[in-house]
Image (cartoon, rainbow, N blue to C red):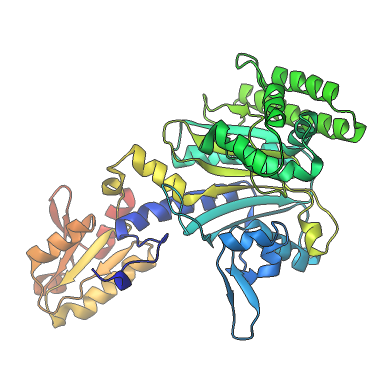
């Protein structure tokens, strides 16, 4: 088969039944975001490269699609929605009501190696709040996450949280030089993926000795039997004993207090059945959670499946310095992003037959037997469409009822209507339920009343 008829590497075609599931997932996310008071926006799929690299550095060019337009302007396809949000907010800040609660759902692009759950073109859905430094923002976003995942029927996941302020304190307590911090965090972020030996190797390649790594790991070695609040208390004591600089101590303590506040509020809400999480889906503190992007300034979080090995399918955190990069005054900001592709992959891995159970959006198929019935058939189709009933009208030149029924059945359409000379004379439809095989003769209005029941 010619390579020219295959989609480019990292991209995919979707069959109609796959699109039905994708649309259901995306619309569920959209409805949940709206229920929480977020307003939808949109922005260009490409931006100036300088803007996209402002928060991540020029090295991001290796990971995104970059091109020049005909005027030699250097542009890039968006690889996430946060940089475009910073530009959008700076451009429109005078028109926006604060706190600004926005969501966006669309395609993003990354030039990276493809693997399970990782593509070069994929859908992402983000919800962000700009204009508040309160930890109530984190609680609202985590509640939104739990509520949305419940509506999607995800189940069996865990939310992992940490704080970049705490990580900064542990880095200094472990004796890692400030200028090596980002390199150390990038390596530590890969621990689960590449293992301890490779992390140590990366440390050494960046001029960080193995003992620094060992010190870091000793500091975060906490008894799994302890609850998260106790773990945070012990970590606070260890860092404060090891760090000399008061500014770093204060920031670390601030980060610990922020996480403690989030955890306490969640525990209270769970006890009152007011939180969006399903029972058994705990929020768990993990001092090794890094989140690779360096613009995070406070709490960070990831959501992972407990039973499907596919990596995190949602993540986010606080980025209070972002909008300042685009020329406006600093604002408290925090967001969460759902990886639509990974959510769909998890759903289909848990239920391999789910595509067979996704019902067709078309409720009624209308077949007219000759040109004499065309006008009545079109009037009937329009009647149902105006009433919100998805209706498909046959386009066959020489219709065969058996073949048409088979066609409608393969598409999962529930009702099949035939219009011939008798139906025109009686001003009725011969209506067949393709599931029960029951056939009746009804008026158009009676057919609509029948549809309303189901």
Q: Residue at x 75, y 22 (%)?
A: 235
Q: In the rendered view, would you say 404 is above or below 337?
A: below
Residue 389 appears in view: yes
Return the x and y of residue 292 as percentages of the image width and height: 64, 46
| Residue 297 vs residue 14, the one in the foreground | 297
Outermost residue toward the bottom in this view:
71
**Corner quadrant of residue 329:** bottom right
Outermost residue toward the top in this view:
225
Which quarter of the rendering shows the N terminus? bottom left
Report whether 18 appears left or right of 128.
left
Report whether 93 appears left or right of 105.
right
Q: Residue at x 45, y 55 (%)?
A: 119
| Residue 126 vs residue 253, the one in the foreground | 253
Q: Residue at x 28, y 62 (%)?
A: 445
| Residue 342 vs residue 435, the one in the foreground | 342
**Corner quadrant of residue 147:** top right
Return the x and y of residue 432 as percentages of the image width and height: 16, 56
Return the x and y of residue 93 as percentages of the image width and height: 78, 63
Residue 133 appears in view: no
| Residue 243 vs residue 10, the one in the foreground | 243
């Amino acid at each position: 088969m010619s390579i020219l008829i295959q989609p480019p590497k990292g991209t995919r075609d979707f069959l109609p039944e796959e699109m039905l599931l994708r649309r259901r997932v995306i619309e569920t996310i959209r409805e949940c975001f709206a229920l929480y008071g977020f307003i939808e926006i949109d922005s260009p799929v490409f931006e100036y490269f300088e803007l996209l690299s402002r928060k991540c550095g020029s090295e991001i060019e290796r990971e995104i699609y970059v091109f020049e337009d005909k005027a030699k302007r250097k542009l890039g396809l968006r690889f996430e929605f946060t940089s475009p949000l910073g530009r959008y907010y700076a451009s429109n800040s005078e028109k926006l009501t604060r706190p600004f609660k926005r969501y966006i759902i669309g395609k993003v692009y990354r030039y990276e190696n493809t693997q399970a759950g990782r593509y070069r073109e994929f859908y992402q859905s983000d919800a962000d709040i700009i204009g508040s430094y309160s930890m109530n923002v984190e609680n609202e976003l985590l509640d939104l996450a739990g509520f949305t995942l419940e509506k999607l029927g995800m189940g069996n996941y865990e939310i992992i949280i940490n704080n970049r302020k705490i990580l900064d304190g542990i880095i200094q307590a472990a004796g890692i030089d400030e200028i090596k911090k980002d390199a150390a965090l990038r390596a530590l972020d890969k621990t689960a993926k590449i293992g301890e030996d490779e992390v140590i190797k990366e440390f050494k390649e960046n001029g960080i000795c193995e003992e620094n790594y060992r010190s870091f790991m000793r500091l975060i070695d906490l008894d799994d039997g302890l609850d998260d609040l106790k773990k945070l208390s012990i970590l606070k004591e260890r860092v404060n004993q090891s760090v000399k600089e008061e500014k770093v101590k204060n920031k670390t303590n601030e980060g610990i207090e922020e996480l403690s506040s989030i955890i306490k509020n969640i525990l209270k809400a769970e006890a009152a059945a007011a939180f969006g999480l399903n029972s058994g889906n705990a929020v768990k503190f993990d001092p090794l959670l890094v989140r690779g992007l360096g613009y995070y300034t406070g709490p960070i979080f990831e959501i992972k499946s407990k039973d499907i090995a596919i990596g995190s399918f949602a993540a986010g955190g606080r980025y209070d310095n972002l909008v300042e990069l685009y020329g406006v005054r600093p604002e408290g900001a925090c967001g969460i992003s759902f990886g639509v592709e990974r959510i769909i992959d998890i759903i289909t891995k848990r239920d391999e037959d789910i595509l067979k159970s996704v019902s067709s959006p078309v409720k009624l198929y209308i077949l007219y037997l000759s040109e004499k019935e065309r006008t009545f058939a079109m009037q009937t189709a329009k009647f149902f469409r105006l009433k919100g009933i998805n209706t498909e009208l046959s386009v066959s030149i020489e219709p065969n009822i058996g073949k048409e029924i088979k066609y409608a059945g393969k598409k999962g359409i529930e009702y099949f209507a035939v219009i011939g000379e008798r139906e025109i004379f009686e001003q009725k439809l011969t209506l067949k339920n393709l599931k029960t095989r029951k056939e009746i003769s009804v008026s158009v209005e009676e057919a609509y009343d029948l549809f309303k029941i189901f």
